[in-house]
Image (spheres, grey):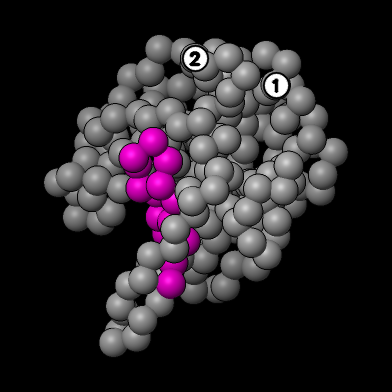
């Protein structure tokens, strides 16, 4: 557990933006996700937990993402949204004490403003997946995201214009879009990559 505790300490010592909707425009729809860090089955590694969306979904089918979703009217905060959605999707109940902080918000092309929260679990409890939202849970080593060649931006066309979007390939899994942007911010926050380039600086 030493590696995870060390990572947590580094996260807490650095500035961690509050989990509010600062920077969110009036038309954006608030949402929140949860990044769960846990010791890997490989000694000395730390895993990042992601979920795969079912292929039959209308939006983001088959994509890797973090547990989370849009804020409900009864949610008292973005953090409550992240915790509620994680419980609904994975059956995991996390106490607020396990939350290390929040990363910068992400405004998506679909009009959502996502607040990402970071948490830790020493061991993963038994999960009950919501089959209508989660096809499977995937654990990927955090170190895999800052290895040479892991960061490979994608070129896409939208509205007849070419755009470059962030993307990672880790253990033959493609992670792209807002999820990849959030991972970028996590790596920068932990000093694992440079703010300007996705290169290993440790």
136 left or right of 25? left
Q: Quadrant of the C terminus?
A: top right
Of 36 and 171, nearer the camera is 171
Q: Which numbered dot is residue 41?
A: 2
What residue is at 35 percent from the left and 47 percent from the top? Answer: 174
What residue is at 52 percent from the left and 16 percent from the top? Answer: 42
What residue is at 65 percent from the left and 48 percent from the top? Answer: 200
Of 194 and 28, nearer the camera is 194
Q: Residues within 10 Å of mark 2 (few under 14, many from 20)?
A: few
Q: Does residue 129 belong to the magenta stretch?
A: no
Residue 61: % across, % down: 23, 50
- The image quarter containing residue 154 is bottom left
Q: Are marks 1 and 2 in contact (CB under 8 Å)?
A: no
Residue projecting furthest to the right: 13
Residue projecting furthest to the front: 148
Q: Which numbered dot is residue 3?
A: 1
Q: Is residue 176 visible?
A: yes
Q: Is residue 152 above or below residue 175?
A: below
Residue projecting furthest to the left: 56
First reached walking from the N terminus: tag 1 or tag 2: 1
22 left or right of 133? right
71 left or right of 194? left
Alpha carbons under labels 1 and 2: distance apart: 13 Å
What span is colored magenta in the figure?
164-177
Residue 111: % across, % down: 43, 68
Residue 26: % across, % down: 55, 73
Q: Quadrant of the N terminus?
A: top right
Element on which disc 2 rests: loop
Q: Is residue 79 visible?
A: no
């Amino acid at each position: 557990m030493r590696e995870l505790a060390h990572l947590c300490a580094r996260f807490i010592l650095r500035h961690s933006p509050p989990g509010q909707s600062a920077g969110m425009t009036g038309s954006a729809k608030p949402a929140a996700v949860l990044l769960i860090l846990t010791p890997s089955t490989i000694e000395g590694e730390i895993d990042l937990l992601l979920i795969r969306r079912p292929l039959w979904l209308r939006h983001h089918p088959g994509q890797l993402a973090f547990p989370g979703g849009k804020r409900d009217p009864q949610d008292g905060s973005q953090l409550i949204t992240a915790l509620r959605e994680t419980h609904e999707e994975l059956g995991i109940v996390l106490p607020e004490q396990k939350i290390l902080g929040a990363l910068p918000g992400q405004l998506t092309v679909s009009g959502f403003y996502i607040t990402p929260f970071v948490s830790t679990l020493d061991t993963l409890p038994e999960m009950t997946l919501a089959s209508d939202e989660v096809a499977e849970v995937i654990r990927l080593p955090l170190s895999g995201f800052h290895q040479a060649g892991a960061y490979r931006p994608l070129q896409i066309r939208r509205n007849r214009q070419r755009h470059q979007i962030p993307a990672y390939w880790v253990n033959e899994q493609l992670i792209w879009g807002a999820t990849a942007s959030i991972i970028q911010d996590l790596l920068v926050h932990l000093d694992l990559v440079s703010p300007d380039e996705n290169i290993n600086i440790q």
